[in-house]
Amino acid sequence: MLQSRLYIPTRRETPHDTESRGQSLLIRAGFIRQLPSGVRAYLPMGQMALRRLCELARKELQAVGAMEVHVPHGEFEEMLISLVGGDLRSYRDLPKVFFARRSLEDGEFLEVCGFECRTESAPIPTFSVEDSPTPTLPVNGEGEEIPPFTGGYRGVLLPPFRRIFHRLGLTVIETGGQGTAWGFVVCSEQGDVFGTCAECGFSMPLAMFPLTDSEMNNRESSTLEKVHTPGMTRVEQVTQFLGCSANQLIKTMIFQAGEECVAVLLRGDHTVSEEKLSAYLGYSVQLATPEMIERVTAAPVGFAGPVGLEGILKIGDRSLRNAGPCVTGANESDYHYRGVTLGRDYEVDRWADLRVAQVGDVCGRCGIGRVQGWNGIEIARGGAVPPEVIERLEAWYMDENSLRHPLRVERFNVNLSRLFLALADLHADDRGVVWPIAIAPFEVHVVDLTPSDEEVHRIACELSACLEQQGWRVLHDDRPSRPGVKFKDADLLGLPYAVIVGSRSVQEGLVEVERRTAQKREKLPVNDVAALILSWRKEDLTE
């Protein structure tokens, strides 16, 4: 492919307002553009790399029996259940796995959906992965490796995606486990905060990390006292005025869930996890408006409390089970209570784990280890389709005894756009992106330094044609640009191998060859180029 015929709008200046170094480099290399609406557009080189990423995933999924489909816009798993669920009525029809690449408003996704039953006569198949490389497993306190989550179609999907991430040169951490959402995360300083238990190795976003009851155990008696706190709506204002710590204050937060409002009670030093609350209630939730809060509590925002709060479901975070006398809002403007005691002054309708985990919390999975924090980018997430969706869509099958059971459906979504950015962020140096050969838009960059020189141009053209005939994907820079511009663009594009054809080397009967990861050039005869880069390619594919 001649570079002069491609649209590759490289930039020298660093763009402003980018999320990460990877995004900045992709914009500078002419792979993507960020539209004013926030949507990311993929230009020709970016689209080529994204297509190769999808093809890599497609081959691995098809190798374990997954079948590609095309599904219009909408919830993938629900539309797929509606499309094929009616034909999967017998245990003999199961298991089945389908996948599709989809372009949604917030990016490009690879969505996978597995249908299965759990009868003895139709066991979940297993696949050998003895020859497949896998990332290093986390280690518990005794130095023993912790096995990753498996079971059902999670066990089927894990091997191909491990192979994919290995070929992309990514070290991923598997999050979640049996009975929870699960996924893959790439460590990155640019990402969200995740937690890992130092004992059992369980990993999860802090917003969803399961926790035990609070270790606090203070049930001393105290007199209920109403205190004037004019204009004090924030935790730090109230605690400073009353001379108490944030863990001695109860926040009462009002959320809208469906058509109803619920009150969530938690300590002042904790944060409500809307993800946990949504999962617990089975509805999407959002903070209630000031008008709703005043209607429910008879007080403006900042003064809600559990004492005397009626007509609303009160859910307490488990960290309050053993809390002693606390400070709370008094459901009256400019007033708080102190000495508030559970059981005497208020009751909780339900208890649940509803807060965002903090570093040092006790893991709710094993009840022993402490949560350690780290930053990462979640590139894939999976989980079971909720039973209510299965029931609503009438997805069932008959077992060998002609008994009806609900289908078990697992979904798994890979955020290709986020993975693409993560690759550019992690595989980069001060010169630009360094693409893994598995998804590079071209493998070899033939840089024709002086196209006006007939001999140099002839050798560059013949070398490009020869490599293409051998199956290499070649980008031939035939532009009449200065050598400095060509070298800078080659660095930004970050193709695995470069062959530099210049008049000085040609006079010596040689060309220069560079391996992008090594940043070192070698001079050799033209006839030896293919053998050298082939040896490099074999090394890069097996590392």
Image: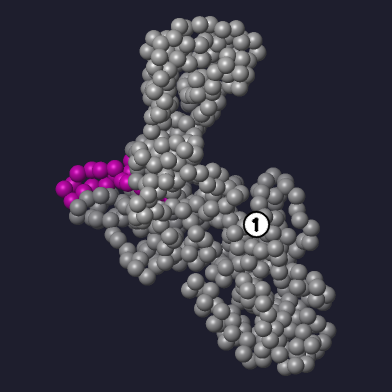
Looking at the picture, how far across and down is residue 56, in whole percent?
50, 66
On screen, residue 59 versus residue 393, left or right, reads right
Vertical order, 130 against 505 (above or below): above
Residue 475 visible: yes
Looking at the picture, how far across and down is residue 15, in whole percent?
75, 53
Magenta stretch encompasses residue 297 = no
Residue lying at 54% horizontally and 13% vertically, measured from the top left: 329
Quadrant of the rendering where the N terminus is positioned? bottom right
Looking at the picture, how far across and down is residue 29, in whole percent?
71, 63
Query: What crowding class fits label 1: few (fewer than 14 Cα within 10 Å), some (14-19), or many (20 or more)?
Result: many
Query: Which residue is tagged 1?
Result: 22
- Range of magenta residues: 392-412
Vertical order, 114 against 193 (above or below): below
Going by the numbered disc 1, the residue's amino acid type is Gly
Magenta stretch encompasses residue 397 = yes
Farthest residue, direction left:
401
Element marked by disc 1: helix
- Of 224 and 495, nearer the camera is 224
Q: How is the image coloured?
A: one colour
Residue lying at 75% horizontally and 90% vertically, measured from the top left: 506
- Of 360 and 406, nearer the camera is 360
Residue lying at 59% horizontally and 59% vertically, measured from the top left: 426
Residue 146 visible: no
Looking at the picture, how far across and down is residue 389, in whole percent?
38, 39
Residue lying at 66% horizontally and 73% vertically, measured from the top left: 519
Tell me which corner region of the image, top left, top right, bottom left or bottom right, holds residue 499: bottom right
Vertical order, 99 against 344 (above or below): below
